[in-house]
Amino acid sequence: MKYGYTIVYVPDVAVSLAFFEKAFGFERRFMTEEGDYGELETGGTTISFASHKLAESNSKQGFVYCSQTEQPLGVELAFITDDVEKAHATALEAGAIEIAAPKRKPWGQSVSYLRCPDGSLVELCTALS
């Protein structure tokens, strides 16, 4: 078994890809001609975005989408960076909403939390040593 993808169901795949490119510096790897699925080049596990319509074609039960909730869902995408404060500021400039400003944890790790325009929750953090 190998962990392959994290897929976030979003209202607009192209908008989410563009935000993640601008806010976090990822590059677009792929997007379908229909614009209902896209991937980012992250250097590790693939982050993908799929449209609500595509998601619903996979499950008749439906979903609770992160874009529909007042509070973030209890799932996050965590990105490791050497400069949490700078990455946090860049994401805010790109349109993210601050959940928690950069803070140093008792174990020495710096972390911050943001909510992306598509509703997804992102943690920015330094690597654990």
Image (cartoon, grey):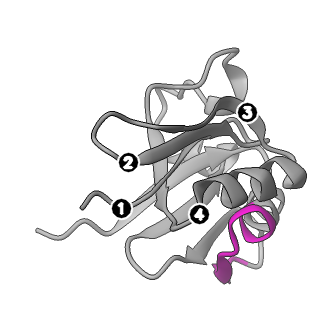
Q: What residue type is labelled 4?
A: Asp
Q: Distance between the residues labelled 4 and 1?
A: 10 Å
Quadrant (top left, top right, bottom left, bottom right) of the C terminus: bottom left
Q: Does the magenta stretch include residue 76?
A: no
Label annotation for residue 127: 1
Camera-side mark, 1 or 3: 1
Q: Does the magenta stretch include residue 28?
A: yes
Q: At 67% across and 82% down in the image, what residue appears?
A: 27
- Crowdedness of circle 3 by 10 Å Cα count: few (<14), some, many (20+)? some
Position in image of residue 15 (x %, y %): 83, 58
Query: Looking at the image, which residue sits at the far left?
Result: 1
Q: Which amino acid does label 3 sit on?
A: Glu
Position in image of residue 36 (x %, y %): 70, 62
Position in image of residue 25 (x %, y %): 70, 74
Residue 4 falls left or right of residue 21: left
Label annotation for residue 109: 2
Label annotation for residue 98: 3
Q: At 76% across and 44% down in the image, what residue appears?
A: 11
Label annotation for residue 83: 4
Q: How far apart are marks 2 and 1 (CA)?
A: 7 Å
Q: Is residue 97 above or below residue 19?
A: above
Position in image of residue 40 (x %, y %): 60, 74
CB contact under 8 Å: marks 2 and 1? yes
Which segment did they paint magenta?
Answer: 20-32
Q: Distance between the residues labelled 1 and 3?
A: 21 Å
Q: Is residue 91 above or below residue 123?
A: below
CB contact under 8 Å: marks 4 and 2? no
CB contact under 8 Å: marks 1 and 3? no
